[in-house]
Image: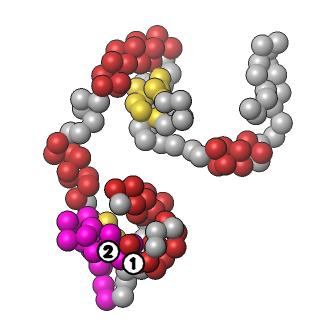
Amino acid sequence: MQCAFFDVINLFAEVRQPMIYSEIARRTEIPLSSCHALLQTMVVKGHLYAPGVKAGYYPTQRLLHVARDIDICSEEPLTLLFQPLLTALRDATGEAAALASTRVVCLDIMESRQKIRYSDEPGGFMSVDARRRLLGSCEPLSASTDGSVIDHA
């Protein structure tokens, strides 16, 4: 059920509007009865509320406040280990430096100090299918040097 909690939160992050529980169940692929129970628990715990009669559910700011109050990510071991390196890399290149896992989940970013720069946020993730669709929609790549990698893989 823990995974389902985050599935619901991520769905709201994507949709950004109130949804009824049957729509939430359908889009998260959670069985209706389980989804209803999860949503009721989330309401009781203060993570969701019903903005109006039959208007569905919408997240409260509880997660934001909990995360901010306990500063849950300030002691994350990998980012603490790599922050000095990321900072030095950013300062040496003048560009953003990112730490990502092997699943291409962004763990930390040291933003460039340039006015126009690459920007992302920790936790950013693009699925394999989404990456394939994006690359498939792009113009064919051309080599700018003899060592340029132009293969989508």
Q: What stretch is highlighted in magenta?
A: 35-53
Residue 48 in the figure: left or right of residue 70: right
Residue that label 1 marks: 33
On the image, which quarter does residue 90 sit in? Answer: top left
Residue 129, percent from left and from top: 67, 48
Can you say whether 81 is above or below 20 in the image?
Answer: above
Asked if residue 87 shows in the view, the reply is: no
Check the image and name the residue furthest to the left.
Answer: 69
Q: How crowded is mark 1: few (under 14 residues within 10 Å), some or many (20 or more)?
A: few
Q: Residue at x 46, y 10 (%)?
A: 92
Check if mark 2's residue and mark 1's residue have beta carbons within 8 Å.
yes
Color encoding of the figure: secondary structure
Q: Which residue is drawn at 40% across and 26% down?
A: 110
Can you say whether 149 is above or below 52 in the image?
Answer: above
Residue 21, percent from left and from top: 41, 78
Residue that label 2 marks: 37
Which quadrant: the N terminus?
bottom left
Residue 114, percent from left and from top: 47, 25
Badge 2 element: helix
Q: Residue at x 79, y 29 (%)?
A: 151
On the image, which quarter does residue 139 sit in? Answer: top right
The residue type indicated by label 1 comes to Ser
The residue type indicated by label 2 comes to Ala
Which quadrant: the C terminus?
top right
State the residue in front, 22 or 140.
22
> Would you say residue 38 sits in the magenta stretch?
yes
